Image (cartoon, rainbow, N blue to C red):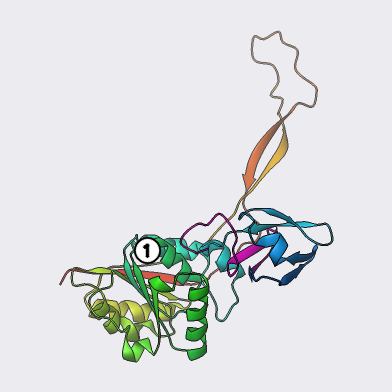
């Protein structure tokens, strides 16, 4: 099992997602002889998981059942253990697109945090790309390295425990893109520029406050970045449902001998309605391009 390659059969040591419902999922590590408790009873790893196909329907000890899913970056984002605030799929999709990531890309990231964005980047740049991720907090950096090994993506990533604003990314002139999610991204622009290839590349900064965006944009301009733009992504999920609508009676047409319809005519149709409530502001995404030297 790997987060960047699909496997058919569950093996010992794999990380799987136990799906009990759309609002109830959890990741577990498969270990011989172990058990996992769910609302429907226990799952025995040796007999219920090991050797089964991903996507299988597994019956628990109380008679209920769950699905055992192959892990993906999207599923990991909604199930990972939170060590920090994380980025979600709505922002991640725009970041991977606007940074022009593809297989073989070399990417710098700071900070690593809980690894939500890191896993999506790794899937995008596999099998020949590489992620250089910097985390200031020692315990978070160590935990991230452990998770990358368990998820069998450690060969695609280098984790450094250092201050990116003072020490940079540890590389020079090899990155295609840089992502910053730190309190003062403007202090890391110099190191980001030196990490990007001489032929140019892309940079993205995620900041929750507009004052951070202003200072970052000023630093990007001072360092010669171009095509600077800031956007905010808001997700509105519309509810598609069936409704019954009455047909109005406009009376008979002129010169018509038809008897007007006095019945209660109606039509059944499907429609989409916007949500009454929705998730609001998460953060601002600032993108820019380093031109060719």
The residue at 48%/72% (across/down) is: 283
Res. 122 image quadrant: bottom left
Q: Quadrant of the C terminus?
A: bottom left
User: Residue drawn at (65%, 15%), measured in percent from left and top?
Assistant: 253
Quick one: 61 or 110, which is closer to the camera? 61
Res. 19 visible in picture: no
Instruction: Give percent across and percent down for residue 119.
Output: 47, 68
Q: Which residues are magenta?
A: 1-27
Q: Residue at x 38, y 90 (%)?
A: 163
Whether 69 is drawn above or below 185: the answer is above
x 80%, y 57%: residue? 64
The residue under label 1 is 125
> Can the viewer see residue 278 in this picture?
yes
Q: Residue 181 location in percent, x, y?
A: 43, 78
Counting from the top left corner in percent of width and height, residue 167 is at 32, 90
Front residue of this view, candidates 224 and 218: 224
Q: Position of residue 13 (x, y in %)?
A: 58, 70
Q: Is residue 267 left or right of residue 220?
A: right
Task: Identify the element where label 1 is drawn.
Answer: helix
Residue 18 covered by magenta stretch: yes
Report the number of numbered marks. 1
From the viewer's perspective, is 62 left or right of 282? right
């Amino acid at each position: 099992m790997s987060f960047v390659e699909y496997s058919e059969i569950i093996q010992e040591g794999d990380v799987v997602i136990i799906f009990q419902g759309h609002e109830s999922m959890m990741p577990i590590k498969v270990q011989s002889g172990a058990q996992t408790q769910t609302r429907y009873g226990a799952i025995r790893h040796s007999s219920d998981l090991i050797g089964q196909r991903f996507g299988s329907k597994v019956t628990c000890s109380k008679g209920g059942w769950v699905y055992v899913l192959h892990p993906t970056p999207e599923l990991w984002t909604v199930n990972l253990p939170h060590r920090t605030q994380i980025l979600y799929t709505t922002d991640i999709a725009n970041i991977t697109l606007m940074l022009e990531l593809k297989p073989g890309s070399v990417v710098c990231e700071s900070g690593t945090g809980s690894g939500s964005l890191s896993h999506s980047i790794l899937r995008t740049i596999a099998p020949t790309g590489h992620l250089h991720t910097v985390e200031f907090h020692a315990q978070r950096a160590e935990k991230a390295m452990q998770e990358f090994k368990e998820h069998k993506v450690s060969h695609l990533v280098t984790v450094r425990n250092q201050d990116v604003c003072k020490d940079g990314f540890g590389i020079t002139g090899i990155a295609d893109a840089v992502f910053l999610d730190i309190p003062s991204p403007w202090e890391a622009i110099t190191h980001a520029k030196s990490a990007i290839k001489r032929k140019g590349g892309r940079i993205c900064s995620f900041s929750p406050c507009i004052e951070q965006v202003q200072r970052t944009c000023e630093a990007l301009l001072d360092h010669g970045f171009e095509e600077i733009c800031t956007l905010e992504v808001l997700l509105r999920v519309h509810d598609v449902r069936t409704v019954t609508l009455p047909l109005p009676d406009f009376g008979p047409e002129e010169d018509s001998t038809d008897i007007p319809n006095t019945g209660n005519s109606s039509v059944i149709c499907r429609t989409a309605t916007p949500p009454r409530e929705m998730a609001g502001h998460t953060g601002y995404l600032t993108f820019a391009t380093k031109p060719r030297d």
